[in-house]
Every structure is written in structure tokens, then in C-alpha cells.
Image (cartoon, helix red, strand yellow):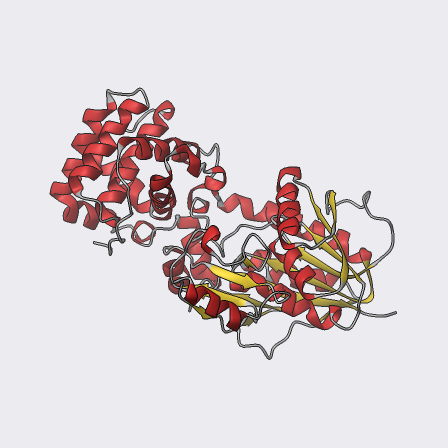
Amino acid sequence: MSQKRSPQSGGSGQEVRAAAARALAPVLSDQGSLAGLDEHSVVARDRGLLKELCFGTCRRLPRLEALAGLLLKQPFKKRDSDVQALLLLGIYQLLYMRIPAHAAVGETAGAARLLNKEWATRVLNGCLRRLQRESEALQAEVDRDESVALEHPPWLLNALRQAWPEQWRDIMDANNQSGPMTLRVNQHHNDREVYLGMLTEKGLSGHLCPHAPDAITLETPCDVTALPGFEEGHVSVQDEAAQLSAALLGPSLAPRPGARVLDACCAPGGKTAHLLEQFDIALTAIDSDNQRLARVEDTLSRLGVEAVLEHADATERDWWSGTPFDAILLDAPCSGTGVIRRHPDIKKLRRKDDIRPLAKLQRQLLDNLWPMLREGGTLLYATCSVLPEENSEQIEAFLARTPDAHVTTPNDVAWGIASGAGRQLFPAQNSHDGFFYARLEKRTA
């Protein structure tokens, strides 16, 4: 049996389990994601439990679904995806959490009444009690399937094994853990050593990250309101791998005060803000999603930095003035396979057939943005993917059709591994997410 998690404070009750089932039902029916999880749908003391139930269930979903298949005499109907969610939640609690078994069974089954499906109470009760009795045998049976035992959909397991024959197991192990909480210290206020001391004074422990010079990883995640100076813009939450974009653009931007920079596909704005904290630049940030662009505006306002924000499609040029940029950051839409531990619903929602259209979009973005870069300028291509089709193969194809593109990705760095013209980072337990970077310079004529 897998190692159980620590207990959640204040967590029990039918209400929180019903709320979790409502949040998971759209994921199970391919109608939504956990991005819109409303933690305020439950009382404050149960919000941590709600998040753990939803994210933990998605993280273990391939195995939970296989067990549910053995426990049920026949599958629930599509309209009862919320009841299916309750069953998965119950299995997750029994196998992976330290909630007492009687509460995991009773409160989960009882939550069906709050979904106006009292008929399901007996079914859920019976399934979960059978799991208690036959846990070892049932788990052994489903774990004969390698993709179930490793808790990844078959297409992704095969893709990772083929792409990374030496690293694939470590990647999946990291995907099955929750990601750490990493901070980016705003150097306008404090250096990170000083800020680490401020955290210690507040009873929060952490350590300096080895690769990103502004990064601190907390030993235990906390609410942002507990972070000293958060509202005043002293610190932000951002993974260490994501913070490397500023370091990679530094050689182009630091010597050019007032440089014109484009952040294409900028939402949710972490990299946008980091560039503005680090460099004296004139930054234009665009995104095709107006709601996500509003989040970027909120982030910049909290940090007291400014950029020109435009609701625009980076595959088009109708928004562009015609004046070339000195640097372009293309944080391209991708499969998210490097951040599954932070978005575990990817295991359910992402399909093998999604990768080719994403690669096509990335190609369109590269080809459309490259002419906007001045001669001698730098384009940084980034994804939070670990799939070569979106990363090394994408850049190799771009270089083949773009004669004036020259690779400047550094090789003398301690992070990631060389991967074609770029560097690939893999998700690492208690460390950074999976990311790919390739830095390109436009040759002068």
C-alpha cells in the first residue's frame, strides 16, 4: 500500500466531500478542469482538505479508476459522474490519507444525499467496505497493469519511456507527488538571504534554490497571506524552473536600458513580472485570453511594475506596430507534461491526439513572431513540457527553415540536460518543475 499522507486539519464532513465531488465531476466527464476550483465553496477550515481531495484524487486517478471498476457491478451512468467522483474520493481517502476509515466511508457515502442521490449511499457504502476487506488483493490485481501501477495513462507512459529511456521512471515518480512551494524574491526590496531570515522569524522554514538566483523553496507550503511583504510586492510564488527565463534573457537585456521586449502568451504573468523586476525595459505583454490577461494586470499592480498589456493573438500581426523588438519571450502553449504534479487533472484531460495540434500551434507562433525580432535580437522559446515533439524537435525544425536563426542556449549551466538546441529540465521531487528552454539569436544580414 502506498505511503499515507499526513492528516488534514479540521477536515471531515459530508459537505466538503460533496463539494469535492462537484468539482471533480466535470473533470471525469471531460467538461472542465480543476483550474476553476472554488475553495470558498466550503468553510475556511475545510479548504485545505477540499484541495487535497480534488488534487490527490486526480493525481492517483488511473489507479483509483481501475479499482472502482473492480468494485462496481456495473458503471455509473454519465449523468452520475458526481457519484463516480464520490467513489474515487472514498478510495483515495482509504488508501492515501490518514482519515479514519469509518469517516472516509461514512461521510463519503453520506455525501450522496447532498447531491440529491440518496440511492447511491448504499452502493458507495458497499464498495468502500469491500475495499477495506479485500484491499490487498484488489490492489494487486489492478497493479498488474503497468500504467495503473505507475498511475499514468498508457499513451503518456509510452511517450515518456520512448523519449527518455533513462529518466522516465523518475519523471513519473515526481509527477505522482505534489510540487513544492517556491518563492521569487523581488530584489528591489530584499535579497533572498535577507528574506529567508524574515521567513524564519515568522516560523516558516525554507532553503535557497541552487539554480535560480531569486528562488527560495519552502519546506511546507503556506497561504500567501503568511508571507512577509506579499501584498507589498516583496515576493511572488513561482517555480524555480520558470524563473530561469529571466536569467536566460539577462545577457540580452541587462546591457540595453529601455530595450523593447515582447512577452507573447504572457498569462498568468509570472515571467512578465520577473523581467520587469530585473531589467529596465519597455515590455509589451499579449495574451489571447482576456480573463487571464486580467490576472496579469493584478499581478503587475501588486508588484508596482508596468507593461503595455494587449488582448491579442500571437499567431497574428494585426496588433503589432511594425517596430521590431529587441527580445521576445515565447512561453508557448503546450501539453503541460512537465507540470502534471501541479495540474494532475492533465492525466485525465490530455490526450495523445492533442500533441500534434499543439506542435502545429507552436510552429505558427515561432514563424509569426520571428519577423518581429530585430537583427541581433534574442528569442527565448519555453514550454512546461517534457515531450520532444514540442521541444527539441520543434526547435530543430524551426532552425532548418529559418537560416538567420542562431542557437545561443548556454551549455555551461548546472540545470537540465542538453536536448537538441535547447535544455530540458525534468520535474524533480522537492525541486523544480519540468521545463524546456531554447535561446535563439537573429543573425545580422
Q: Nearer the viewer, residue 209 or 79?
A: 209
Image check: 225 left or right of 122? right
For residue 37, above or below residue 171:
above
Q: Nearer the viewer, residue 9 or 56?
A: 9
For residue 344, above or below residue 238:
above
Q: Position of residue 153 (x, y in %)?
A: 39, 48
Residue closest to the far left: 133
Instruction: Please identify the quarter of the rendering in which residue 413 is found.
Output: bottom right
Residue 73 at least partly seen:
no
Which residue is painted at 22% across and 49% down in the image?
Answer: 98
The quadrant in which the N terminus is found is: bottom left
Q: Position of residue 188 (x, y in %)?
A: 64, 65
The quadrant in which the C terminus is found is: bottom right
Instruction: Please identify the quarter of the rendering in which residue 77 is found.
Output: top left
For residue 132, above or below residue 342:
above
Image check: 134 left or right of 440? left
